[in-house]
Image (tube, rainbow, N blue to C red):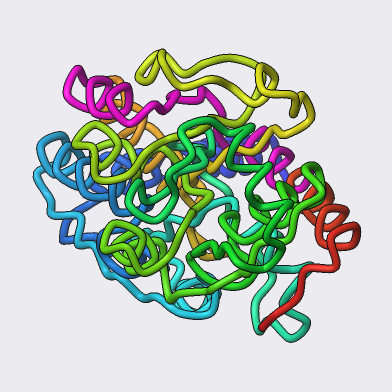
Amino acid sequence: MNPGFQRRDVLRLAAAGAAALAAGAHAQSNWPTRPVTLIVPFPAGGGTDAFARPLSAQFSRITGQTLVIDNRGGAGGTVGASIAAKAAPDGYTLFMGAVHHAIAPAIYPKLDYDIEKDFVPLLLLANVPQVVVVNPKRVTETTLQAFVANAKKNPGKLNYASAGAGTSHHLAGELFKLQTGTYITHIPYRGAGPALQDLIAGNVDVMFDGLGSSAQHIKAGRIKALMVAGSKRNPAFPDVPCAAEVGLPDYTVTTWYGLWAPKGTPADVQAKIIEDMKKALASDELKAIWASNGSEIPNISAAAYGSFVNAEIRRWAAVVKDSGAKLE
């Protein structure tokens, strides 16, 4: 092979490489060119919806394309996750899951998807403290301590609603029972929305909910907050004591919401999704909505988000084991 041929070959390869890079940049800058579907694995009206819908509106303003919310509830969020896992990995179907999906592997023995292997972690969207809320007509106690005392005197008489077996609402309730030495009957629903509506209607006593879905109802007086989880009060509800203040320093439960794409989604599309979602989260509109819901906007994406989810899976597996929580 003579030097001239080698030089021409190098130039040809360089040109091909430059064209490939340009094509990659072009593909990234063009996404999205049509509406994007966001699978929300719970019925409308729950905590996931409280963040997904304003996010959808802001995303549309930024990209000029519609982000269509597709509510696919059932089985503690695992039905929607299964559908999302099988979607085409082209960036036009995204999945908004939650802490429930880190709990599911420990409580659902036969999942047909793997949250760690079948999805690409993109971005943690919101981090919301859990709150203990009661129907004030059914529960007359106005403090967490009085509520616990009543539950101890009447084991099994009180009940709590959850978004379904294996959800954070369920495990938060079981953890609460472990740490307070109480027995409260679990009533699972097909999503946080229906559970919360039954609490408001007076059909159940208590719920261990994320502030994102309970906030507006607490402010309106439909339900009463007795405690927020964690070691500090929430700025949106400064009058509600935190768990550490009422003798439960280890009761740290948050409902987080995150974004995934099906495995195989191109890297440049992943990068563009993260970029556009971060722009949406940085908007004044979403900052105000997140704050009113008592939520933080985490700055965690890609690999760090994946590591976070892996740690949450291990953490909740231990809670499931210790509490004996199971499908009902």
In the image, residue 263 sits, relative to residue 130, either above or below, namely below
State whether residue 266 is above or below residue 270: below
Q: Nearer the viewer, residue 42 or 299?
A: 42
Give whichever of 142, 10 is nearer the camera. Answer: 142
Task: State whether residue 22 appears in this view.
Answer: no
Whether residue 309 sits left or right of residue 178 in the image: it is: left
Tell me residue 26's x, y (percent). 29, 43
Task: Please report the residue visible at 75 percent of the width from the left and 50 percent of the height from the top.
Answer: 175
Image x and y of residue 142, in percent: 46, 33
Judge whether 122 appears above or below 144 on screen: below
Quarter holding residue 160: bottom right
Picture coordinates of residue 262 (x, y %)?
51, 65
Q: Residue at x 75, y 53 (%)?
A: 182
Q: Is residue 296 magenta?
A: yes
Q: Which residues are magenta?
A: 283-311
Task: Decide: is 35 above or below 312.
Answer: below
- Quadrant of the frame with the C terminus: bottom right
